[in-house]
Image (spheres, coloured by chain):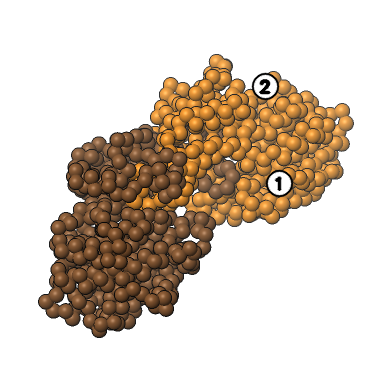
Chain colours: A orange, B brown
């Protein structure tokens, strides 16, 4: 099923067309682009030969549902992906524009190249190719491609809860993760959860001159700094009371497996991260820190003056964007209450601090003992020629917990991204050979799943 | 010399025309407006009847110099003001647009209304009126109106140092301060100095996904918070080692005079500041905290994502805008070194923190024992009908220290702003009766100075 070069060119053009749509889900100005991307997905599924394809509109951005159920008696797979992308900012750090997909060194650079348009397209093209070649699929397939993954929208949750029969499947395939290393086929069996929100700090009733008032009035940026510094220690440990109580350590077997992965901490620091020193909890390995430990991260602080030059303002208010990542068995609702209480306790005098949750998702681990994980491992090994490894990811894919909990589906996270793909950052890319090998691997997976 | 209503209307129209020019000195996009404002000043001085008016260009924004030296044997006064203004942001908090001057409740609202276009115009109109009425002035007058006060530009410093003969005067009059309370004529006899700069914090070589990397990599916003929290205590005391060593406490006489001022702390908190609690060093009075104690204030923190919604980014770098206000006898160069060293000491592992000074100015106090201060007090009392009080200001007017040091001129800070004029903030205003009474007071001051 290896893909001839002429076909690769066509697949690449389709990928570029998909990537050109600036479907930034968090930005209301891109509502039309979101709809365009959803329609692109629907058109792709229709042209692939799926019998039933629907745009599901309602609250939030539309989902696309499609199905091919022509293999009675065979397993049913639910394929998940998302067509929405992160904002491209900061724009001036992109070598080529975020929404003008450009190939350099066998990589395609564009926002969404890996996360997740490229990978969602891998699923769709694999099904399209198998149908084109054989006129049928070896298993039944359902697609659910959403447009709110990057904003934690609730449309998919409501839909999954309301349509358990329609979405019934023997396993869900999520193609939104990465390989541990180039050439190393990888299945992700654990994800961190998240709570993301805004800390609103208010001080005076209007901005004040720092000369006239400085020394007697509260500064919400100073308050923000004091609260942030109080909530995480310099040792990297989150200082929210009770935060670690529910944290379950990885098993001995997991730790051993992780230790045997080809991971070079110095190379990771120097080449992948590019910082002068890694940070975080001492005496805990890097992989465990990013896969199995909760975090507290500040994403932005709004308030005052950040233009060129000098403005001597004490702002009236500040907003801090904060997330914490959660690990088994932390509960997002409990963690949110703990964070909210810790903020109240750390709030200095003179200001009001209010925590506003934007979205949350639970952490999860996937039980590896199921035939579809075996099918996935076999399919990937066949394409990449190496034994498949099982890892966790530090990211959060809310749909995994949702499908596990609501539909009881085992979730198979097969991903073809690479560690240096710059997800959520400027110069996001997808290694093109992995785009094509991903399609091949999913085609083999369809075959292998028929035996499951 | 009270101003008839028909003349008031004309003066108001001139003020509005001046305020309409968005002469924001810190923003390179307003270069043409800066030039327009300078030309407005030059035209005003020419039409007032000054013999020699010049635009002084060079590095930075132009200054305007003008002189009338037709009173041989009489004292010479140097009138200082500035035509540049602070940025108007945040724009959406202005009730009427910042550069569309609008009169409401006897106040004129616009950026620069008080700071300092309105007050610079008071000086120019007083001279114009006296010349129009009598054909001459009772003293010799020189004007120096600059365009870089809000950005601490160095053009005026170079000019003052290079032209001591031209700028020679018996006293300098700076009209850029405020009255302690409505109807209470006020002369400011002390100013805080300042150092203003940017703290540049760099962590990774690019923005990173907080899911994939969170827990193992430095976050420059977290580092910013830790450094800020380390440099000022929750008790309001600046925690920069050595920072208070040179601080000279106000004299007993000053403290007594300040205690007798009509100051209601609760009203100040509730109406002027609008915060739920005042902050700052305990056991030090509010007026002493803002007039005679140094500060550490954060003005803005750039880095990461502050748009709508959620973006899970760990930024590669952050920039923090910081100032400290300085009091006698702190030295800006020493304070800058102390701050720089304290930042280095507070910098957490994994990041680089670099302090970049933008500008600095020394604190100063003015000796009240000189005849021009007496003339000013008398002139103001005549207009306002109350005894003139002597206060300090927490702000920084770099030219005062410069004129004192380079030319040995006593600086008289006569100001007609009010405490609720929203300097540097949205809805800056000038109380219109003070605009007209200010002109009257300066006219009396010209008369009184002739006797000095």
| Residue found 33% across the figure and 73% down from its top | B2
What chain does badge 2 belong to? A
**Which percent across, then down, holds residue B196?**
32, 51
As drawn, is A157 to the left or to the right of B321? Answer: right
User: Where on the picture, by quarter, is residue B435?
Assistant: bottom left
The residue furthest front is B385
Q: Identify the residue position indicated by label 2 in the image.
A: A367
| Residue found 28% across the figure and 75% down from its top | B127
As drawn, is B452 to the left or to the right of B102? Answer: left
**Which percent across, then down, holds residue A88?**
56, 50
As drawn, is A438 to the left or to the right of A143? Answer: left
**Which percent across, then down, holds residue B94?**
50, 58
| Residue found 19% across the figure and 70% down from its top | B449
Front residue (pair B422, A343): B422
User: Where the C terminus of chain A falls, by quadrant?
Assistant: top right
Compared to B241, does A410 lie above or below? Answer: above
Query: Is disc 2 surrounded by few (<14), some (14 to 19) or many (20+) residues within 10 Å?
Result: few
In the image, which disc is placed on residue B68? Answer: none
In the image, which disc is placed on residue A61? Answer: 1
């Amino acid at each position: 099923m290896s893909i001839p070069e002429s076909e690769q060119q066509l697949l690449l053009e389709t990928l570029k067309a998909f990537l050109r749509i600036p479907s930034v889900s968090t930005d209301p100005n891109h509502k039309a682009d979101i709809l365009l991307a959803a329609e692109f997905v629907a058109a792709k599924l229709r042209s692939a030969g799926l019998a039933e394809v629907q745009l599901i509109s309602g609250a939030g951005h539309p989902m696309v549902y499609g199905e091919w159920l022509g293999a009675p008696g065979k397993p049913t797979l639910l394929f998940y992906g998302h067509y929405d992308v992160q904002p491209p900012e900061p724009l001036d750090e992109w070598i080529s524009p975020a929404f003008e997909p450009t190939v350099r060194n066998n990589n395609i650079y564009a926002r969404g190249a890996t996360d997740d348009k490229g990978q969602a397209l891998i699923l769709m093209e694999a099904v399209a190719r198998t149908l084109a070649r054989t006129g049928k699929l070896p298993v039944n397939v359902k697609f659910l491609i959403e447009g709110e993954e990057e904003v934690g929208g609730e449309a998919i949750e409501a839909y999954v809860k309301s349509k358990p029969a329609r979405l019934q499947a023997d396993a869900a395939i999520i193609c939104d993760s990465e390989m541990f290393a180039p050439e190393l086929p990888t299945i992700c069996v654990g994800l961190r959860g998240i709570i993301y929100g805004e800390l609103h700090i208010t001080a005076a009733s209007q901005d004040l001159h720092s000369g006239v008032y400085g020394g007697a009035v509260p500064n919400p940026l100073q308050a923000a700094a004091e609260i942030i510094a109080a909530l995480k220690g310099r040792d990297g440990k989150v200082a929210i009371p009770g935060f670690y109580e529910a944290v379950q350590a990885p098993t001995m077997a997991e730790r051993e497996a992780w230790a045997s992965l080809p991971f070079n901490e110095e190379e990771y620091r120097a080449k992948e991260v590019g910082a002068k020193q890694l940070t975080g909890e001492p005496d805990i390995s890097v992989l465990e820190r990013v896969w199995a430990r909760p975090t507290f991260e500040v994403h932005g602080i709004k308030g005052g003056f950040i233009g060129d030059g000098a403005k001597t303002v004490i702002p009236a208010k500040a907003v801090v964007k904060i997330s914490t990542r959660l690990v088994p068995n932390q509960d997002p609702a409990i963690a949110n209450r703990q964070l909210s209480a810790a903020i109240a306790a750390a709030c200095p005098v003179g200001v009001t601090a209010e925590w506003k949750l934007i979205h949350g998702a639970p952490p999860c681990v996937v039980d590896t003992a199921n035939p579809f994980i075996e099918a996935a491992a076999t399919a990937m090994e066949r394409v990449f020629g190496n034994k498949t490894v099982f890892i966790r990811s530090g990211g959060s894919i809310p749909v995994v917990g949702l499908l596990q909990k609501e539909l009881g589906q085992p979730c198979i996270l097969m991903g073809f991204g690479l560690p240096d793909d710059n997800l959520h950052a400027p110069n996001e890319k997808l290694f093109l050979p992995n785009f094509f090998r991903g399609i091949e691997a999913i085609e083999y997976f369809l075959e292998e799943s028929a035996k499951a």
